[in-house]
Amino acid sequence: MTNICTFSNRVAFVTGAAGNIGVALCRLLAAHGVAIAAADLSKDILEERLAGIKGIRAYKVDVRDPESVKTAVDSAIKDFGHIDILFCNAGVWNHTDVKGVQRFEQMDYGQWTNLLRINLDGTMNCCQAVLPHMIANGYGRIVNTASISGEVGLPGYADYAAAKAGVLMFSKTLAMENASKGITVNCVSPGMVAVGEPQPTDTTWIGRRGSADEMARAMVFLAADESGFITGIDLPVEGGRTLGPVNAAKL
């Protein structure tokens, strides 16, 4: 039987590569023989966390800054010759000035703007930098990291939920615009993701948090050569959290 995740001399550009999901994604891509341009705010941290992974180069990038993104993308194309896959994985959800949730009417405008700039504008900046190259080559896979908060909301995190909802609709529109050019655009929407081993929780039907590896496997599937007939979808990876009340009667 044919492997459902094969890659033909592919190069992936991965943002947020030093994060929990980003590291797992880079490891899995390398295991599939994909060359990786790994991008994050700190090149030193990138190289430390991705040490030992073959076929990888590190690039410093601030996804909020279009020029920073363009410089990193141009460097990666020069180094590798082409970019076939883009993972817009850079993102933050935490509030810097408070601990945990924050009601919307108490939210500082600068905080709101920063979360949208990283999560939504960052995705836009990366897609805009890479798309012309993909269009010229007639091939591309774009996988954007969204969130279940963009599907159903997240009280206390109106800024993050709004940004991720924007990522979802942006991705669907981009999928329609580029389907005839050999380019697919899809989203993976993580739920609760553990750092390290997934802990038990009573907030998902599966009864535990997800792992970074589980998120990475979904992302790699959508980036594979065989996934060319899948575009414009949002793939929730969240243990059934959005199905309905977890405390409903279990038969």
Image (cartoon, rainbow, N blue to C red):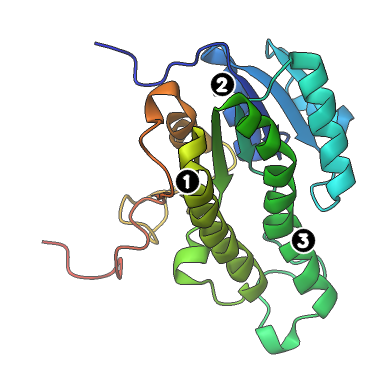
The C terminus sits in image quarter: bottom left
Of labels 3 and 2, earlier in sequence is 2
Q: Is residue 136 left or right of residue 7?
A: right
Q: Residue 153: horizontal and vertical position, in percent?
A: 50, 72
Q: Amino acid at mark 3?
A: Arg
C-alpha span from label 1 to label 2: 25 Å
Is there any visible trace of residue 215 in the rendered image?
no
Q: Residue 7: horizontal and vertical position, in percent?
A: 49, 16
Q: Amino acid at mark 1?
A: Gln
> Residue 29: which disc?
2
Of residues 246 and 86, which is closer to you in this image? 86
In the displayed structure, 65 sits above or below 243; it is above
Q: Residues within 10 Å of mark 2 (few under 14, many from 20)?
A: many
Image point (52%, 50%), residue name:
177
Of labels 1 and 2, earlier in sequence is 2
Label 3 sits on residue: 117
C-alpha span from label 3 to label 2: 27 Å
Label count reads: 3
Label 1 sits on residue: 199
